[in-house]
Amino acid sequence: MADRSALLDALRDEAGRCRACPLWRNATQTVFGEGPPDPDIVFVGEQPGDREDREGHPFVGPAGLMFDKALAEAGIDRKRAYVTNAVKHFKFEPRGKLRLHKKPNASEINVCKRWLLAEIDILKPRLLVALGATAAQSLVGKAVPVGRNRGAVIEIENARRAFITIHPSSLLRMPEPVDRQAAYAGFVADLRKIGELAGKLPRSGAAAAA
């Protein structure tokens, strides 16, 4: 595990100097993944939000708090999972004093994919989880409609498996409380299924025991 931790630290430092796409110019910093070096599950989101960009940690904003609550209800220990994003810099549109989220384009997703794949190569998890369309596109290598593929486990390169579900931020955008409550329950159900699957699957990679 010490070797994996050292490799992750080196990768984090390298990613912090990335200038491969223009997003670094306006972002505060690179927001790299966090979690144990031997997780059963790696959760992949879209990109850092405003608070993540300022604090330098993934999933600490409103969607992250929703995610933490859902994980706890599903019986998944956040400290035993690794959380990261498909894109490591915050893409936004200034609106007065606000910085409004802007979806990464295909080029930005592809450029940043090297960091995500390198994380996965080191971590060798049992299961990857794509939280939303951007994460699914990065992991699968093409556009993946979340609505039609939600709950599916897709085999990707190197015999890895990716579970497709929604991003918790989608719950925050629902205006009606009754709709939000139903969607949240469905998300928790997905997470329970993810926890069960991860307990049954082998670790990815031939060197899983390293």
Image (spheres, rainbow, N blue to C red):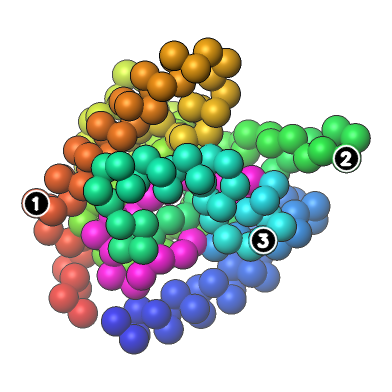
Residue depicted at 12% across the width and 58% down the height = 202
Which is more foreground, mark 1 or mark 3?
3
Query: Which is more N-terminal, label 3 or label 1?
Result: 3
Q: Is residue 112 left or right of residue 166?
A: right
Residue depicted at 43% across the width and 56% down the height = 83
* Amino acid found under the numbered disc labelled 1: Lys
Residue segment shown in magenta: 33-49
Please tell me how crowded label 3 is: few (under 14), some (14-19), or many (20+) other residues with Cα within 10 Å: few
Label disc, if present, on residue 97 of the rendered structure? 2
Q: Is residue 144 magenta?
A: no
Name the residue beneath numbered marker 1.
Answer: 200
Question: Looking at the figure, which quarter contains the C terminus?
Answer: bottom left
Please tell me how crowded label 2 is: few (under 14), some (14-19), or many (20+) other residues with Cα within 10 Å: few
Q: Position of residue 17 (x, y in %)?
A: 67, 70
Q: Is residue 22 left or right of residue 61?
A: right
Q: Considering only vertical position in the picture, is 94 above or below 22?
A: above
Majority SS type along the magenta span: loop
Name the residue beneath numbered marker 3.
Answer: 55
Q: Position of residue 100 (x, y in %)?
A: 74, 35
* Amino acid found under the numbered disc labelled 2: Lys
Question: Looking at the figure, which quarter contains the N terminus?
Answer: bottom left
Residue depicted at 24% across the width and 48% down the height = 75
Q: CA distance from mark 3 to mark 2?
A: 18 Å
Q: Position of residue 35 (x, y in %)?
A: 40, 66
* Amino acid found under the numbered disc labelled 3: Glu
